[in-house]
Image (spheres, grey):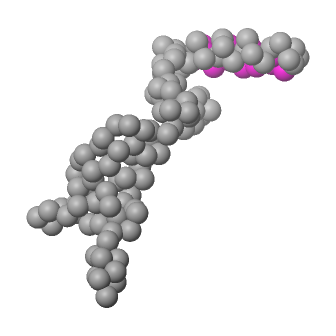
Amino acid sequence: MLWRKTMSKAKSRNERNLNSRDGKWYLDFTFHGKRIRKFGGYTKEQARNTIAKIRMKAIDEETGFRKPKLEDPLFQDYTEEFLKRHYVRRRKTGVCHRQYFNMILKSDLFKGRRLSEITPATVAKYHSE
């Protein structure tokens, strides 16, 4: 009988790290020797998801799968880099690409713009001109 009481009150392995206080769920666990304590959410499910996200982020950083922050180059710099890579493998195609990029770069729509500033609307406007 005593065994049943202790087993029914014992938390499962995944639930040990979750604590509820004042209607909020908090996390308290150790991951790779580092103790992590923080707010997990207003429901138990949110807290479980938060633990999973924290663990995945730590694993990604550890294994090097974390996405690097990408810089936002100028369109002209991007075209030069593109041509360097593709001109070596396919010379005829590289010549065509160079001609197309030169025509595009003459337009005021693409001069001095960053890649993130070029939208489908910009391309449509270029085509209409």
Point out the image quarter for the C terminus: top right
**78 vs 9, nearest the viewer:** 9
State whether residue 15 is above or below residue 79: below
Which residue does the image show at 66% across and 11% down from the upper left?
A: 80
For the record, the magenta segment spans: 93-108
Mark yes or no: residue 122 visible: no
Q: Is residue 19 left or right of residue 65?
A: left
Which residue does the image show at 28% across and 60% down from the upper left?
A: 18
- Seen as rendered, the residue at the extreme front is 2
Q: Which corner quadrant of the image does residue 21 belong to?
A: bottom left
Q: Position of residue 90 (x, y in %)?
A: 87, 18
Q: Position of residue 119 (x, y in %)?
A: 51, 34
Q: Position of residue 11 (x, y in %)?
A: 33, 69
Q: Which corner quadrant of the image does residue 89 belong to?
A: top right
State whether residue 3 is above or below residue 59: below
**126 vs 45, nearest the viewer:** 45
**35 vs 106, nearest the viewer:** 35
Q: Which corner quadrant of the image does residue 31 belong to?
A: top left
Count how many numbered circles sit on residues in the image: 0
Mark yes or no: residue 18 visible: yes
Which residue does the image show at 15% across and 66% down from the upper left?
A: 23
